[in-house]
Amino acid sequence: MAQGKVVLQPVSREDVERIRVWLRDDEVSSSWFGRYAYGDPAHLGYQPEEVVKASEDEWERVFGNPEHRILSIYTPEGEHIGEVHVAIEEALGDGQLSILIGRKDKWHKGLGTAAVTETLELAFTEWGLYRIWADVPEYNEAARNIFKHMGFTHEGTLRKSRPHEGSRFDSVVMGLLAAEYTGRAEQSADEAAATSY
C-alpha cells in the first residue's frame, strides 16, 4: 500500500461496530474525543452502542444529517481504519473536524494526514465552508503536529477542558480558513510545476 492514501466513504453498520470496539481501548478513545467525566468513551456524532442497532429512520437521522458529516476512512485496499466527523455550524460556514484512526497498527503512517487532506477538500470545495477548526487535547502531540503541518493556526486554549487518566488537561483550538487552504494548494501546484522542468 502506498503510504498515506485513504478513501472516505459512507458509514456502514459494520463500521460502527468496529468503532464501538476500538473506542473500548483507552489509547484510542483518548486520541478521539476522550471519555466523559463518568468514564464512557465519548463520541459527539452518535452513540455507537445505540446506533449499531438503530432502525433505518434513526440511521438516516444520524448519517444523513447535513450538520454532522460523518464518513468512514478506508485504505485503497478496502480496510476500514477510522472515521472522520465534521460538525457544521451552517450559519457561520464553520466546521469542527475530528479524525479517528482506530486501527493502532495504522498509526504514524501518514493516514491521519491523508484523512485530513481529503476532508479539507470536501469541506472547502464541496460543502463551501469558510473555516475548519479542531479541538486537540494537549497530550495528543501527533494530532497537533498533523494540523500544524496542514497549515492550521493555534487560535486559543481551552483550559483543563479534557479529563484524561484521572487528571484534567488543556486543549488547543486550531483553525484553517478557506482562503488559507486555497493559498496553500496554489503554492503546492506552483512548486510542483517549477520542479517538473
Image (cartoon, rainbow, N blue to C red):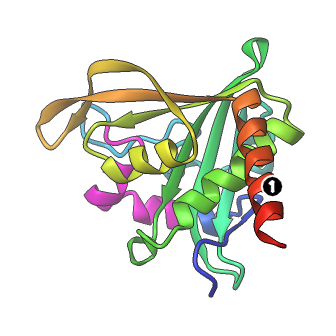
* Mark 1: amino acid: Ala
* Front residue of this view, candidates 12 and 186: 186
Local SS, label 1: helix
Residue at 63 percent of width and 58 percent of height: 115
Residue annotated with mark 1: 189
Q: Is residue 39 left or right of residue 157?
A: left
- Secondary structure predominantly adopted by residues drawn in magenta: helix
* Front residue of this view, candidates 11 and 128: 128
Residue at 49 percent of width and 52 percent of height: 49
Task: Please say whether residue 45 is one of the residues in the magenta stretch.
Answer: no
Residue 194 picture location, percent across and down:
79, 62
Residue 153 picture location, percent across and down:
50, 29
For disc 1, the neighbor class at 10 Å (few under 14, some 14 to 19, many from 20) is few
Residue 61 picture location, percent across and down:
76, 37
Does 31 sit above or below residue 106?
above
On the question of residue 166 being in view, the answer is: yes
Q: Quadrant of residue 5?
A: bottom right
* Front residue of this view, candidates 15 and 51: 15
Residue occupying the far front of the picture: 197
Does 155 sit above or below residue 69?
above
Q: Give the quarter of the figure containing the N terminus.
A: bottom right
Q: Is residue 183 left or right of residue 98?
A: right
Q: Quadrant of residue 166?
A: top left
Residue 123 picture location, percent across and down:
77, 39
Q: Is residue 39 left or right of residue 92?
A: left
On the question of residue 59 being in view, the answer is: no
What span is colored magenta in the figure? 18-35
Q: Give the quarter of the figure containing the C terminus.
A: bottom right
